Image (spheres, grey):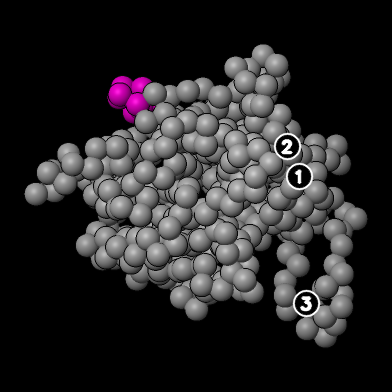
């Protein structure tokens, strides 16, 4: 498989509040280093993408290192993007952090603040105090901002956009893995959270639509996109963005009552025109691989009915048995079975597919787990025979 990587994604390093401790964030550059190192010894091809290269020097003048800003502007809040880009510098200038320290929020605009005056909440504007901005644009304390967070987040988004361009440009049946870091499925397009700053799946959809329309010229084109989210945690940000949109089916298998706690329930079925195009399949903590595969079968049933033209996978490996942030019982060989079950399904067998990396925090097993998944995806026959 073609795997896209950008070394700029390694530059983001932060601290987070976990339990009662301020610790180096579990979402670390070592995750990507471990995966790249495992891929380099395999038959997969790692292509290094440079988000900062001027597009003229690239192999294609339409390279999304120029386009990614367009996709960001058309999907994410302008004030939020400006915040991600500048808040660390502003905190350093104000003496609030040292250059090597992390911006973390103090106060959040909690919904309970506005029960006596809904209008105040409705017209709530960004606070004037740069110290308070950190809480206005985040919903938790796992999304600190360091000096390189913006560079890495934009590079991560660019990998999603470049992956979308390549799956559209190439023949059918093409699958690409984008080693996105930071991940994306928890942030909305105006609030960071859960290690996520830019929603890479949202960027990928924008890029897919753009490149499909380029191919079809003036003829209107309506790709039918399914986003299948296999991270242990519910992709609240992705669900939120496409909730009313019938041209994107969002399907998520995740831990019930786990982070991010306030979404991911079965009765969230989409709104407006999007009713019926949002499917949450929560699983109890400690679910086994057999229980997980049953949910995958349910997911594929819904996806088959939808008849997607393109597939986006939000793929997290925090479903692994010993993951510190998950509680499922999946082992390395289960990833091959899961990938095989999905890719060999007639519904998506030939659909161009873009796989975006989300979470997964057992660094010493990440490489093996990614390789197992890719093997199951690309060689379903082999995975099935191993299963028998
Ligand atoms: Zn996760």
* Residue 73: numbered disc: 1
Q: Position of residue 63 (x, y in %)?
A: 64, 26
Which element is circle 3 on?
helix
Question: For the residues marked 2 and 3, what is the alpha-carbon distance in whole angstroms?
Answer: 35 Å
Which element is circle 1 on?
helix
* Residue 113: numbered disc: 3
Give the crowd class for mark 2: few <14, some 14-19, many >=20 residues within 10 Å.
some
* CB under 8 Å between discs 2 and 3: no
- Which corner quadrant of the image does residue 298 belong to? bottom left
Residue drawn at x 51%, y 67% is 278
- Which corner quadrant of the image does residue 2 belong to? top left
**Disc 2 vs disc 3: which is toward the camera?**
2
The magenta region covers 36-44
Q: Is residue 40 covered in magenta?
A: yes
Q: Residue furthest bottom?
A: 116
Question: For the residues marked 1 and 2, what is the alpha-carbon distance in whole angstroms?
Answer: 6 Å
Q: Is residue 350 above or below residue 232?
A: above
Give the crowd class for mark 3: few <14, some 14-19, many >=20 residues within 10 Å.
few
Q: Position of residue 182 (x, y in %)?
A: 56, 42
Q: Position of residue 97 (x, y in %)?
A: 76, 41
């Amino acid at each position: 498989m073609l795997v896209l990587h950008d070394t700029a994604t390694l530059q983001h390093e932060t601290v987070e509040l976990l339990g009662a401790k301020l610790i180096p964030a579990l979402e670390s550059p070592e995750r990507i280093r471990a995966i790249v190192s495992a891929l380099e010894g395999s038959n997969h091809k790692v292509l290094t993408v440079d988000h900062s290269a001027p597009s003229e020097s690239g192999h294609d003048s339409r390279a999304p290192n120029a386009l990614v800003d367009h996709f960001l502007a058309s999907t994410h809040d302008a004030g939020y993007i400006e915040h991600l880009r500048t808040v660390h510098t502003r905190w350093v200038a104000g003496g609030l952090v040292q250059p090597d320290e992390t911006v973390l929020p103090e106060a959040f605009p909690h919904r309970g603040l506005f029960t006596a005056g809904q209008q105040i909440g409705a017209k709530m504007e960004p606070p004037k105090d740069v110290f308070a901005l950190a809480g206005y644009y985040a919903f938790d304390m796992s999304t600190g901002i360091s000096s390189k967070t913006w560079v890495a987040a934009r590079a991560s988004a660019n990998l999603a956009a470049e992956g979308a361009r390549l799956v559209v440009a190439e023949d059918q049946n093409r699958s690409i893995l984008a080693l996105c870091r930071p991940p994306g499925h928890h942030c909305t397009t105006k609030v960071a959270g859960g290690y996520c700053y830019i929603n890479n799946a949202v960027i990928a959809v924008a890029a897919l639509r753009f490149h499909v329309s380029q191919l079809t010229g003036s003829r209107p084109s309506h790709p039918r996109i399914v986003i299948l989210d296999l991270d242990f945690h519910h992709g609240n940000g992705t669900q939120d963005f496409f909730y009313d949109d019938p041209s994107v089916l969002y399907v998520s298998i995740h831990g019930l009552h786990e982070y991010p706690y306030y979404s991911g329930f079965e009765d969230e079925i989409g709104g407006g025109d999007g009713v019926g195009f949002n499917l949450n399949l929560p699983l109890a903590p400690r679910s086994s691989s057999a229980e997980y595969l049953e949910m995958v079968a349910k997911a594929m049933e819904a996806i088959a009915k939808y008849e997607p033209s393109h597939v986006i996978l939000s793929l997290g490996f925090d479903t692994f048995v010993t993951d510190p942030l998950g509680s499922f019982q999946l082992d390395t060989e289960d990833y091959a079975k899961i990938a095989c079950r999905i890719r060999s399904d007639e519904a998506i067998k030939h659909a161009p597919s873009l796989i975006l990396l989300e979470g997964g925090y057992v660094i010493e097993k990440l490489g093996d787990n990614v390789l197992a998944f890719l093997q199951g995806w690309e060689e379903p026959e082999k995975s099935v025979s191993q299963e028998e």
